[in-house]
Amino acid sequence: MRNQLFITIISVILAANVQVRSASPQFEVRVLADLGGNATLPCQLPSKDTMFFGATGMRVKWTKVAEDEAFNEDVLLSMGFHEKTFGSFEDRVSIVNSDSDDGSILITNIAMQDAGKYQCELINGMTDVVMEVHLEVQGGLKDGVVFPYHLRVGRYNMNFTNAVRACLEQDAVVASSDQLLDAWRGGLDWCNAGWLSDGSVRYPITKPREPCGGAKNGPGLRSYGLQNRRSLFDVFCFSSALKGTFYWLVQPERLTFAEAVQACLDDGAQIAKVGHIFSAWKLEGYDRCDAGWLADGSVRYPISRPRKNCSPTESAVRFVGFPDKTQKSYGVYCFKAEQ
């Protein structure tokens, strides 16, 4: 009954979007963390001379702050000795010392998506503190990017040999299990199983859910183990840093696929491959909210700065699909190799 009451109180507080009083002092710090490691985000009362009502009288609320407030994420709410964590932070975040006037939190298993601005609101009696903490994450795949890939004919249509060929055709190679692990630590979440270079089949889950290995299983690499190489799956490819220039070709009108191929050739380049767009997006921060043809007949666009109408919630290479190649609905991305 007591736990149910606590959850009800939390729901009321979150729904009301309770704000700390504007007279509260403001603090800002930066924390650097390693990918896959742990990080402590500090939040403390400013002075030990401040009247202290004890841990049972203190409320702490942590929020991950987005540029658009509509996408703010609740991280943790603590009232006395009770704590509740939310969303992707569930079971990864806890108050460092619940017996003191310290509202600092520990985040475990740091992923790239954890980077950003956090706000701590701490209320203890008549004392309020609002603190901003900027978490920076370092490490991971520095010279390449892992991406999932499937053929135009649909998912789960490649044996191991065809998977190797598919990655090569996209200027990439089949990813290793270590590369997929690094990509998962960096936030890659994909609910379709794919081949890896050792002949195993796995898929990375950062946000557990029922259709993807079960909601009660924690984040991690779901594994089918070593498979018969004639079995059919998707594939995870690894593309290294670009040796050339990836770019959007400005054209006066939209193009069919054949026109897109020719337009890049006329510009002294080739139509870009899927490996090119992922490398440009991940390693160079390429950002363009225009859907364009790629060499495999797919249409995609890279967003490194999430915003309304352009991947509003996350940085990603957005996949439009494999449209009819005679459609004049898209532009084109080109790639010009180094000479």
Image: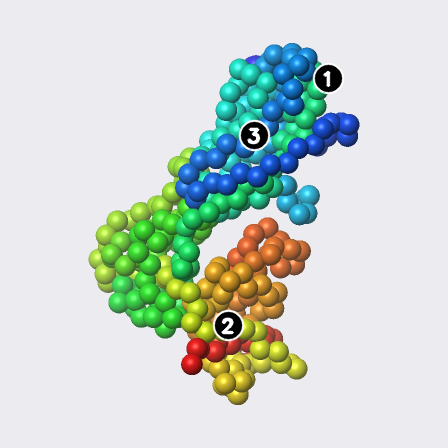
Foreground: disc 1 or disc 3: 3
For mark 2, give the secondary structure.
strand
Disc marking residue 33? none
Q: Label 3 sits on what residue type? A: Pro
Residue 67 appears in the rendering: yes
Of label 2 and label 3, which has the lower sequence position? 3
Question: Which quadrant would residue 125 be assigned to in this image?
Answer: top right
Q: Which residue is mark 2?
A: 246
Assess disc 2: are there few (<14), some (14-19) or many (≥20) residues with their C-alpha within 10 Å of its C-alpha.
many
Rendered residue at 53%/29% (across/down): 105
Image quarter in which the N terminus is found: top right
- Percent x, y for residue 111? 46, 44
- Place of residue 193 in the rendered image (x, y in percent of width and height, measured from the top left): 36, 54
Q: CA distance from mark 1 to mark 3?
A: 20 Å
Nearest the viewer among 231 and 302 is 302
**What residue does disc 1 label?**
126
The answer to whether mark 2 and mark 1 are in CB contact below 8 A is no
Residue 5 in sight from this viewpoint: no
Q: Quadrant of residue 238?
A: bottom left
- Above or below residue 88? Residue 284 is below
Picture residue at 57% right of the left edge, 34% below the top: 75
Q: Residues within 10 Å of mark 3 (few under 14, many from 20)?
A: many
Circle 2 or circle 3, nearest the eye: 3
Tell me the CA gap for discs 2 and 1. Answer: 57 Å
Mark 1 falls on what kind of element? loop
Q: Amino acid at mark 2?
A: Phe
C-alpha gap between disc 2 and disc 3: 41 Å
Q: Which mark is residue 42?
A: 3
